[in-house]
Amino acid sequence: MPTFFLACALLGGGVVLLQLVATLLGLDHDAHDLHAPHAHDAAQGLHLGSLRALSAGLAFFGLTGYGLLRAGWGTPAVLGLSVVAGVAALVVVAVLLRLMLRLESDGTVRIENAVWQPATVYVPIPGARAGAGKVTLSLQGRLVEYQAVTGEGALPTGTPVTVVDVVAPDTLEVVRTPATPLD
């Protein structure tokens, strides 16, 4: 019986160690998880079937069983406590994986979020929608540059503007930002 528990501990611990090394070397791309496509969405529950969770559970099952047998505990108690330790490790790792996946962001900049945001003319914009210039603005925590048109008069470089509409997938409509009086 001790050999069985030791084998479980070595197998589970070995897989955990291999995953750690693969992660440190940049070879970890979630290909080891047993789940359906798009199961990386944190809203889909715990990843109890992931290789990380299963290998941690197996390692703790084996370590607990081996340790309790060496301490002189009886076989029924050792089996029961080992299963509890293995399941607890499996659940803890699955919960930690779920919490880490909540931190993920797809990073997609959504141009529609630019409406009513302040911007600055980067490349002069011809007036009366006669052509496009460019503006820069801070959008979703990053500095972005988009083509821009205006229905007003020409807007020179450096002019503060406000985005009022999205007219194409990569083009914004802007208006001159009114100057605010100084107090």
Image (cartoon, rainbow, N blue to C red):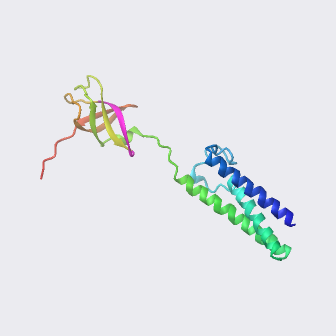
Q: In the rendered picture of this protein, how many numbered marks are placed on residues?
A: 0
Q: Is residue 155 left or right of residue 46?
A: left
* Percent x, y of residue 120: 27, 37
Q: Which residues are magenta?
A: 140-148
Q: Is residue 31 left or right of 103 when viewed as pictured? A: right
The image shows residue 21, relative to residue 80, as above or below, that is: above
Residue at image location 12% in from the left, 49% down from the top: 182
Asked if residue 66 lies in the magenta stretch, the reply is no
Q: Residue furthest right?
A: 1
Kindly identify the residue that appears in the image at 60 percent across and 48 percent down.
40
Residue 53 x %, y %: 68, 57
Query: Residue at (76%, 72%) from the top-left corner?
Result: 81
Q: Looking at the image, which residue sits at the far top?
A: 130
Which one is in front, 159 or 14? 14
User: On the rendered structure, is 136 left or right of 101?
Assistant: left
Say which quarter of the image contains residue 171.
top left
